Image (cartoon, rainbow, N blue to C red):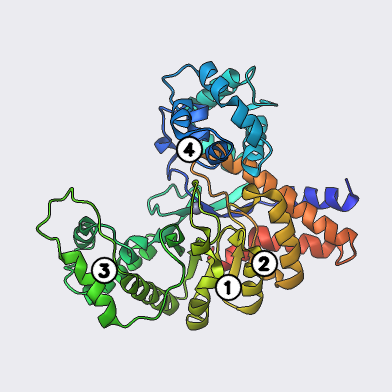
Amino acid sequence: MSDAYERLGEFIDSLTIVDTHEHLPGHESRRPAHLDVLGEWLTHYFSRDLISAGLDEARLARVCDPQVPLAERWQSVEPYWRAAASTGYGRALALSAQALYGIERIGADTIEELNRRFVAARARGDHYRFVLKEKSRIRVSLLDADLGADRAFFVSVIRLDGLICPTHRRELLAAQRRLNTPVHSIRDWKRAMELELEQALAKGAVAVKCGLAYQRSLRFDKVTEAEAEVGFNELFSDLNAPDWRSGIKTTKAFQDHMMHHLLAVCEQRGLTVQFHTGLQEGNGNVIYDANPVLLTNLFLEYGGVSFDLFHMGYPYTMELSNLAKNFPNVFIDMCWGHIISPEAARRALAEWLDAVPANKISAFGGDYCFVDGVYGHQELARRNVSRTLANKVNDGDFDLDRAREIAQWVFVDNPCRLFKL
Ligand SMILES: [Zn+2]
């Protein structure tokens, strides 16, 4: 272990960092009380590696079922757990087990004790403060789509995806009620979007988030209002249909037009918009829909919007490098990245630091639905940034002072500036 690595590690461990992206329950009291450690920890991420390793969905459901004896569930999941244990997801959970519960190795002989400690900690309460503040040293986390979240830990980010891609006329009726505004034309619908945004900002939202890469391509063409309205009007074509009737798919032209409207409104307000790009959670997704280069026309047109591009664009990390180098309004966000692949995160960061100004990278966002995972992720993030910067120092690219400055920027100053924290 090099001297530079140790000294940088010490400095980075001393930082109270900004977390650009989470999906945690907005209040600790809303954690699911019926789940045990396997149920909560396999909500997402590592469970997908288990599926990838060969576990089938029906057995995964049984592994997460607290009614089935824990030892029996562990036995059925163990071969897949061992197969995936050294992925970023697996290592994050191992780090959390060690630091939060004092369990050195998750296995048949420790799973019962891990669960006892997990359940006891949840019953004690104060677990958000313990994990996020005491152990993870996080100043604040940006929370996806929860405007009423606990302000001791979170600031909110608003999602307007439902107004760009409504999937059922019920959503249109709900928006009318929620915003107390009638909707009969696409102009009314755009007004509803503006109202929703205004209300969110008044409640303290610091940015807008777009997760539409899960549903469609990130290419949003320039479309006239007239063309878009044809698609919008289809929402009214089944007004007489029963409520349980299956959803509708709005036209791409309508969705494209609404995205451009949203960005025009965000530009007026000088807002940052977070975009999901790259890897999608789950198994069997369409990765080419999420390539960040598809957003290029939006970067060109909306120069007044800051685009915070998520997940290192993985696997399009070099494309993201090109975009962030080229466009003053494109920023790199490593949220989710250090657990998708710790090695890819280090390699990408090393390359970005050679190509992209260091004021454009945010190094950490936990992106977890359960709080324990955040600890393991921030630990991997701190180690990854230490290792990458130490290599640069050892290679003679810059000195230790510059490395410390960059660490301070990517973990704290850059996200603070981007989200006006
Ligand atoms: Zn997310």
How many numbered marks have been drawn onto this rendered protein structure? 4
Q: Residue at x 49, y 33 (%)?
A: 56
Tell me which amino acid carries mark 4.
Answer: Thr
Q: How far apart are marks 1 and 4 (CA)?
A: 32 Å
The residue that mark 2 highlights is 318
Q: Position of residue 230 (x, y in %)?
A: 23, 75
Q: Is mark 4 on a helix, strand or loop?
A: loop
User: Label 2 to label 4, Cα distance in Å?
Assistant: 30 Å
* Disc number placed over residue 330 in the picture, else none: 1
- Which is in the foreground here, disc 2 or disc 1? 2
Label number found at residue 192: 3
Three-letter residue code for mark 3: Ala
In front: label 4 or label 3: 4
Marks 2/3: CA–CA distance: 38 Å
N-terminal of the pair, mark 2 or mark 1, is: 2
Label 1 packing within 10 angstroms: few (<14), some (14-19), many (20+): many
Q: How crowded is mark 4: few (under 14 residues within 10 Å), some or many (20 or more)?
A: some
Q: Which of 160 and 55 is in front in this view?
A: 55
Q: Label 3's element?
A: helix
Which label was assigned to residue 43?
4
Q: Which tag, 2 or 3, sits closer to the chain's start? A: 3
Nearer mark to the viewer, of 1 and 3 = 1
